[in-house]
Image (cartoon, helix red, strand yellow):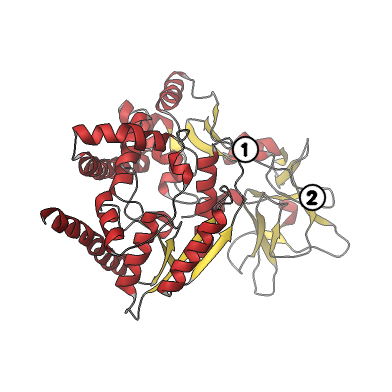
Amino acid sequence: MAHSKRRADDAEAVPAAIAAAVLDWARATPTRRDVLVAFSGGRDSSVLLHALHAALADSKEWRLAAHHVHHGLSDRADAWAEHCRSMCVNLGVPLSIDRVRVDTRDTRGIEAAARAVRHASLAQAAGDTHLIALAHHARDQAETVLLQLLRGAGPQGLAAMAYGSDHYRVRPLLAVPAAAIAAYATRHALSWVEDESNQDPRFERNRLRHVVWPALIASFPSAERTLARSAKLQSDAARLLANLAAIDLAACSSGVAHGTAAQAPVLVPRLLMLSPERQANALRLWLAENHMGPVGAATLCDWLRQMRTSRATQTLRWSVGGDGASVIVYRDQLQRAWPHDAWPSVPWRGEPSMRLGTSAGNVQFERVAAGCGAGIRAPRLGEHWHIRRRNAGDRIAVSERSGHVSFKNVMQHAGVPPWQRAMWPLLICDNEVVAIAGIAIASAFTVYPRTSQDVAWRVQWKPAWHNALQP
């Protein structure tokens, strides 16, 4: 009798967690009332879908749907999709099924490749309106903590999975024990599919789950609960470290031209005034804010050593990730250098905005209002205007007194780093440099509009990577 009562109490943990989660969602995302369950057809996602349906069935505010990703990696994949369809029909829950292709030769491994495809499919199905509900529970969280610990992760990795994360993904069962999930499935006589890959010892999580975990739980019965609690403590510690890093980056920042303060170039002398631990902590946040992959502790330590021992006039450059991006130290400023693709010359016929190739961004022309300074005069009949990249020997006459000045000297004076100059747009009239976008205008083409009838332009370059830095 006591055993039966305990199982009943276990089962009650699921609807209690769902009810609490729905209240949290209503407060945190007041404009979202659509929930999309990531539905594999397995036990955990079946419990999540069933419990959410029970909680939201009578609600006039919330709408529930399910999404199944058909990976095609198993001979039983069609049967799994049909099982999901049958359960959703019985519950009256709309279901979408996406047949995807997983690259089995992906260098990250088939598990990571399938996960990336699955996340992309869910994000597309959810769009801008749905919360994405995932069925991870406390045992999953405990396993993740152990795996991260064995990989040598710091607080951010040991924080494991978040209850609510970016892209509106939520995990309402994350604090619910695996035993409660099983009890709920038994109470409601749920059926589910079993993925044979969950028994495959090639995958490290399966080895942990089937070999290590039984011995661990036999010696430490509360391991699931205590490891999940550790994840919460590590999450708190990671948040505090991120807050400290943001404070340090603000103090070391050279100013914000685009994006956020944490994305701005970093003044190296100020960074090196911090303790080594805070230097590395600040750099980790800077890399994340600039959408660059994580860098190991040994690599960060080597970067900081090179910064301490190099001369102020020396340029340092380190490649990060596989997208061709680099971290560069130039004139004692640490900044990101984005990869550049060549773009062809394009004619200008007065358009307010022009795209440069496929990845270089846009050139924008703004009308200069009367009394608001200098601009470029309007093209005249018979002139040929176009936009191109620099050529060897390019010079611009910024004033009658100085005469023609080399492109290099103008860019050095403006503080534009060398790796950006080859891609910088120049506005050309016939064979004369009219303007270097956002930097200088040739004196012969400069006008000062006095009335609303006077036409004058300013030209600016909006590189494609500026959009990537927007929050």
Classify mark 2: helix, strand or loop. loop
Q: Tell me how many marks there are.
A: 2
In the rendered structure, are the residues bearing label 1 and label 2 in contact, judged by CB atoms less than 8 Å apart?
A: no
State the image coordinates of residue 220 (x, y, percent, origin top left). 19, 35
- Whether residue 260 is situated above or below residue 203 in the rendered picture: below
| Residue where numbered disc 1 is placed | 105
Q: Nearer the viewer, residue 451 or 176?
A: 176
- Residue 248 is at least partly visible in this image: no
- Outermost residue, bottom direction? 60
Q: Nearer the viewer, residue 241 or 97?
A: 97
- Whether residue 352 is situated above or below residue 181 in the rendered picture: below
Q: In the rendered structure, which amino acid carries the disc numbered 2?
A: Ser
| Residue under the image location 24 percent in, 64 percent down | 20
| Relative horizontal placement of residue 61, taking residue 401 as reference (left or right) | left
Q: Residues within 10 Å of mark 2 (few under 14, many from 20)?
A: some
| Residue where numbered disc 2 is placed | 345
**Foreground disc of the pair 1, 2:** 1
- Outermost residue, top direction? 309
State the image coordinates of residue 287 (x, y, percent, origin top left). 45, 39
| Residue under the image location 55 percent in, 54 percent down | 77
Q: Residues within 10 Å of mark 1 (few under 14, many from 20)?
A: few
| Relative horizontal placement of residue 223, taking residue 260 as reference (left or right) | left
Classify mark 1: helix, strand or loop. loop
Which sits earlier in the primary sequence, circle 1 or circle 2? 1
- Outermost residue, right direction? 382
Question: How far is the residue under mark 1 from the one under mark 2?
Answer: 39 Å
State the image coordinates of residue 340 (x, y, percent, origin top left). 66, 41
Q: In the rendered structure, which amino acid carries the disc numbered 1?
A: Arg
